[in-house]
Image: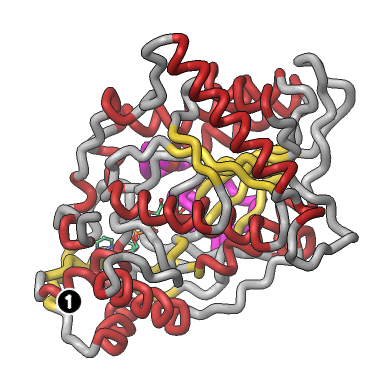
Amino acid sequence: MSSMNDIPSTPGKFKMDKSSHFHRVRWHSSYTKLTFWSIIFLGLIFVFFIRSPSSSSLPADSSRRSLRTYGWGAGFVGTHVSAALKRRGDGVVGLDNFNDYYDPSLKRARQALLERTGIYVVEGDINDSALLRKLFEVVAFTHVMHLAAQAGVRYAMENPGSYVHSNIAGFVNLLEVCKSANPQPAIVWASSSSVYGLNTKVPFSERDRTDQPASLYAATKKAGEEIAHTYNHIYGLSLTGLRFFTVYGPWGRPDMAYFFFTRDILSGKTIPIFEAANHGTVARDFTYIDDIVRGCLGALDTAEKSTGSGGKKKRPAQLRVFNLGNTSPVPVAELVNILERLLKMKAKKNIMKLPRNGDVQFTHANISLAQRELGYRPTTDLQAGLKKFVRWYLRYHSDGQKAAE
Ligand SMILES: O=C(O)[C@H]1O[C@H](OP(=O)(O)OP(=O)(O)OC[C@H]2O[C@@H](n3ccc(=O)[nH]c3=O)[C@H](O)[C@@H]2O)[C@H](O)[C@@H](O)[C@@H]1O
């Protein structure tokens, strides 16, 4: 497996070759097809019925429904959520297209981690309806945790098509399959704090306006929220959107600032630190991955069943949107100070004007709704969370990428 040093030094410039990375599951002959589905079928039988919650050695929480969740495998948040579901005894299967927006070897390492815990990750794309339909034919998934997206705010100016492909076309394709499934699953999916765009009222509440996106990424996430409304309204799909606020932590995404700042401080490379006009502070409500995982599980556990069947709605279904943030924004300059202390190295800094490429000046979540409805209570501040990230980052390199946390 290649090392993290192989990650290009300008992560926002990763080129995604869609043709070679999407639709990786191809059928060359009916024999290959038959073999593939036999393996998948046996694998899923194993995952859901042999290693099912009731047969798990983990303590069962009898007050909780056991979920059969269809999650998205080897992404940052998906890996953590899938592992947490599995730990508590739920059945989980993953799906990931392993595209090269960032170093696929990190995704493969996450996949290996998941497979060690008994989670099988199917390699395929959410735009592949035949694949999704087959999976639903094999297992009656109760829940779908949809975390497959083209992420990153700045990259949207370089590869706009990839955002439309994953965040809009892929999402619609998934909803089409879910609406026809019998029973229909409940769906929890990742929206983004970026939908607040140029909103200046803080902290951001779910009731605030979200009609001024500052990036195409934000616009596709906002479109996702509207599309969710439509599928809920017409087909009775139970849908919960989670607006994540700059999620960070071990096994994170190398295109995010905290991750590549760490790499570049260690290698002595200059890091660009953005500031707003008149030396204005740029800040983010950085949220630690374990807090986000608890929010995701809370959303899954409180999701009501979808109400449709045979593609028709029977009665109104649940439609929700929640902020999942940390409620304490930290300036980017302070993020760098913390990293310098943890790494015991001085950063070479280039303070520059916030580019007009989709970044907003600050984010700040009001989480009272998630607190009330999901029992969401973030407990990790940036200092504590970055400490865990840095420990993971250093071990991941020194242990040949086998570090578990
Ligand atoms: O909250 C969210 O919804 C979004 O959070 C992050 O987006 P962002 O907050 O922009 O995270 P980073 O790209 O890691 O940037 C963090 C901060 O560092 C700043 N930054 C970034 C890059 C850089 O070179 N220098 C710099 O100062 C940014 O302006 C921002 O304030 C994720 O990348 C998005 O996928 C996600 O949807």
Q: Residue at x 89, y 26 (%)?
A: 315
Magenta residue span: 193-217
Residue 344, above or below 65: below
Is-magenta flag for residue 216?
Answer: yes
At 78% from the left edge and 54% from the top edge, which residue is drawn?
A: 55
Q: Quadrant of residue 263?
A: bottom left
Give the quadrant of residue 360.
Answer: bottom left
Q: For the point 32% across and 76% down, which residue is it? A: 395
Residue 72 in view in this figure? no
Considering the image in quadrants, where does the N terminus appear? bottom left
Residue visible at 26% across and 50% down in the picture:
103
Q: Is residue 209 above or below residue 6?
A: above
- Return the x and y of residue 118 as percentages of the image width and height: 57, 52
Q: Circle 1 sits on which residue?
A: 266
- Classify 354 as above or below 275: above
- Looking at the rendered structure, the secondary structure element under dot 1 is helix
From the top left corner, tell me how far across and down residue 273 is, in percent. 22, 68
Q: How many numbered markers are drawn? A: 1
